Image (cartoon, rainbow, N blue to C red):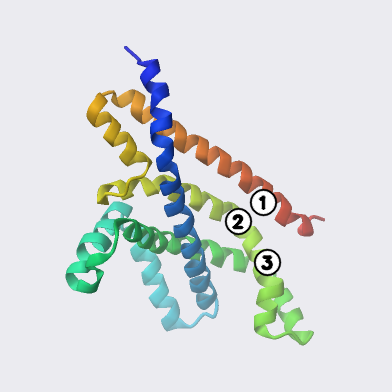
């Protein structure tokens, strides 16, 4: 096998300028997904049958549709039904897609996190005179979010890699950069290996940061 080392090394400076686009999509999407997922988890935690059924359908739907199909529905399909969306950019469509899809996963993760907190703490908080909002804000949510952090981080890693499907609607991110390079060089192995290494190193860096955050946030709960 002929491996072009010089070309392989030259790929990195050409694709790295596209990394911020990938990170932007991933970070913004996970933030929206966390807000929506936590909202769904809190609403389902009230155990109202109709509300629970609606959000169960939401979760099933967005977890069941592949990312690329959902992206095509949002970017190509919705503007046909709602003409006002014809001016929606590809990056915006990608963020909407990933926010909806990953909020469905995070809703279940956050619900499990809420369930992991001893119900007696809520009762004790209410008995001491705190309102329900204060109990959740000061007692339940801090513990639930710490418990949910590892799985939330795993979701971000999945989203970071999943963001490559934004290439299919024309977003100029890492995979798109690799595709453009192969169109002129035809050196697929070297190019996509470099792209894969950039993704891998990004995940490694994030995993290290997540471990530091987990350690810091978990300190108050050490016994």
* Crowd rating for badge 3 (residues with CA inside 10 Å; few <14, some 14–19, many 20+): some
Does dot 1 land on a helix, a strand or a loop?
A: helix
Does dot 3 land on a helix, a strand or a loop?
A: helix
Distance between the alpha carbons at the discs numbered 3 and 2: 11 Å
Give the camera-side residue of 118 and 194: 194
Q: Is residue 91 visible?
A: yes
- The mark that comes first in sequence, 1 or 3, is 3
Q: Are marks 2 and 1 in contact (CB under 8 Å)?
A: yes
- Which residue is at a point 33% across and 54% down the rendered structure image? 67
Residue 192 percent coordinates (x, y): 35, 30
Which residue carries the number 2 mark? 149
Residue 142's disc is 3
Residue 108 percent coordinates (x, y): 50, 64
Which residue carries the number 1 mark? 213
| Quarter of the figure that contains the N terminus | top left
Does dot 2 land on a helix, a strand or a loop?
A: helix
Q: Of all residues shown, which one is farthest toward the top? A: 1
Distance between the alpha carbons at the discs numbered 2 and 1: 9 Å
| Residue 44 drawn above or below residue 1 | below
- Which residue is at a point 45% across and 82% down the rendered structure image? 49
- Which residue is at a point 49% across and 67% down the rendered structure image? 37
Q: Is residue 96 left or right of residue 121?
A: left
Residue 88 percent coordinates (x, y): 28, 64
- The mark that comes first in sequence, 2 or 1, is 2
């Amino acid at each position: 096998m002929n491996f072009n080392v010089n070309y392989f090394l030259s790929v990195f400076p050409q694709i790295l300028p596209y990394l911020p686009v990938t990170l932007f999509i991933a970070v913004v999407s996970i933030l929206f997904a966390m807000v929506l997922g936590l909202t769904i988890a809190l609403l389902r935690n009230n155990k109202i049958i109709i509300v629970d059924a609606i959000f169960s359908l939401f979760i099933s739907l967005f977890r069941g549709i592949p990312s690329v199909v959902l992206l095509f529905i949002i970017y190509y399909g919705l503007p046909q039904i709602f003409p006002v969306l014809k001016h929606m950019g590809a990056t915006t469509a990608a963020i909407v897609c990933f926010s909806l899809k990953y909020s469905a996963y995070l809703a279940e993760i956050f619900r499990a996190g809420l369930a992991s907190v001893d119900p007696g703490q809520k009762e004790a908080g209410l008995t001491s005179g705190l309102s329900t909002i204060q109990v959740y804000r000061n007692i339940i949510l801090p513990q639930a979010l710490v418990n949910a952090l590892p799985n939330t981080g795993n979701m971000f890693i999945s989203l970071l890699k999943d963001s490559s499907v934004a290439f299919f609607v024309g977003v100029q991110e890492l995979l798109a950069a690799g595709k453009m390079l192969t169109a002129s060089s035809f050196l697929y192995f070297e190019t996509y290996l470099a792209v894969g290494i950039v993704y891998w190193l990004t995940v490694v860096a994030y995993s290290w940061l997540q471990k530091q955050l987990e350690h810091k946030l978990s300190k108050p709960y050490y016994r």
